[in-house]
Image: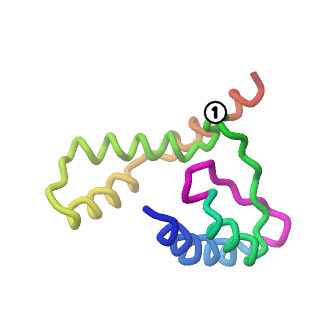
Amino acid sequence: MNVAMYRENLSDNLLPSARALKMKRGWVFQHDNDPKHTARATKEWLRKKHFKVLEWPSQSPDLNPIENLWRELKVRVAQRQPQNITALEEICMEEWAKIPATLYKSVVEEKKRMLVE
């Protein structure tokens, strides 16, 4: 994914999700220091859309629970060995749907414990 694709993803997903969830002003968007996140074009897009962005110190531990879930998905998909992009997409969707809610909860709880320690 490059900077343009990231901004397109934000536009296609973040904006509609915020609207669908009826999120009022005051919420804060979080992403890490990946170069596409910190690119001037991305920062400008977020500024123009009036998003507040959480400051993310460099070299900080990754406290975003989604990273653990991406790893889980990656392992599950690799075990099924997709042979082409269509199979990869289908397998990703199937395996994401199979990840139990209890795993989501445990990942969030683990991150909460990290913050307290």
At 72% from the left and 46% from the top, the residue drawn is: 56
At 27% from the left and 57% from the top, the residue drawn is: 91
Q: Residue furthest right?
A: 26
Please tell me in which quadrant of the rendered image residue 113 appears: top right
| The C terminus - image quarter | top right
Q: Is 53 included in the stretch rendered in magenta? A: no
Image coordinates of residue 6 in percent, x first then y, are 52, 66
At 61% from the left and 78% from the top, the residue drawn is: 16
Q: Residue furthest front?
A: 40
> Viewed as shown, does residue 27 lie left or right of 33?
right
Q: Which residues are magenta?
A: 23-37
* Above/below status of 104 relative to 86: above
- Amino acid at dot 1: Pro
Image coordinates of residue 115 in percent, x first then y, are 74, 31
Of helix, strand and loop, which one carries label 1? loop
Q: How many marks?
A: 1
Foreground residue, 94 or 85? 85
Please tell me in which quadrant of the rendered image residue 106 appears: top right
| The N terminus - image quarter | bottom left
* Above/below status of 21 relative to 103: below
- The residue under label 1 is 61
Foreground residue, 48 or 27? 48
> Viewed as shown, does residue 64 lie left or right of 68?
right
Image coordinates of residue 85 in percent, x first then y, are 22, 64
Image coordinates of residue 12 in percent, x first then y, are 54, 77
Q: Main secondary structure of the magenta part?
A: loop
Q: Residues within 10 Å of mark 1 (few under 14, many from 20)?
A: few
Q: Residue furthest top?
A: 117
> Viewed as shown, does residue 77 lie left or right of 30?
left
